[in-house]
Amino acid sequence: DLFGRLATEGVESIHRGRIELKMHARMPLVGCVRLLALAEGIEETPTLARIRRLGEAGVLATGDAEGLVDAHGHIAQLILRQQVADIEAGRLPGVHVEAEGLTAGERGRLHEALRAIDRLRKRTQIDLLGRQI
């Protein structure tokens, strides 16, 4: 949110207290990496392979590429764990992760992941559009 906190769904939502990681994390990450890879003529299709190739090509700094690989894995792990918990509880699995169920370390990694994705989004806008939207 505006104050750098993890924004959860509000009281009016059926996903109250959960973080929607597909729309706020996975889609921007995958989309931006796809756009940068296409602009560079990178033919790989898996997101992780694209990130690594963007790093090798110097489009992404090594630390940025590593951070995005970590972000991708951490977000996937959180979603998968929540889906397993949802199934075990008799709920339909989705992409909304229970914020209260995160450890302090997981919260910290998620903050870092979201910041890295936001930097990537801004960079992609500037690189491809010449400005931020």
Image (spheres, grey):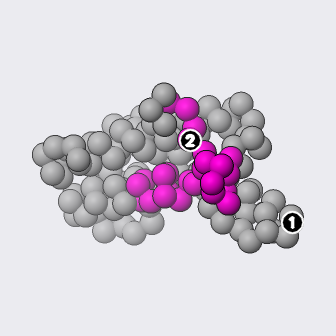
Q: Nearer the viewer, mark 2 or mark 1?
A: 2
Q: Nearer the viewer, residue 52 or 130?
A: 130
Q: Is 52 in front, or is 116?
A: 116
Residue tagged 1: 88
The region drawn magenta spans: 4-30
Q: Residue at x 25, y 64 (%)?
A: 38
Is residue 18 rendered magenta in the image? yes
**Residue at (49%, 51%) from the top-left corner?**
25
Q: Position of residue 48 (x, y in %)?
A: 47, 57
Residue reaching furthest left?
Answer: 130
Q: Badge 1: few (under 14), some or many (20 or more) residues near its Cα, within 10 Å? A: few
Disc 1 element: helix
Residue that badge 2 annotates? 7
Q: Which quadrant holds residue 104?
A: top right
Residue 58 shows in this picture: no
Whether residue 42 is in magenta: the answer is no
Residue pictured at 86% horizontal, 64% vertical: 89
Residue at (56, 54) in percent of width and height: 21
Q: Nearer the viewer, residue 13 or 84?
A: 13
Q: Earlier in the sequence, mark 2 or mark 1?
A: 2
Residue 12, horizontal then vertical, whole percent: 63, 54
Q: How many marks?
A: 2
Residue 125 visible:
yes
Question: Hey, what amino acid is under mark 2?
Answer: Ala
From the viewer's perspective, tell me whether residue 29 is left or right of residue 102: left
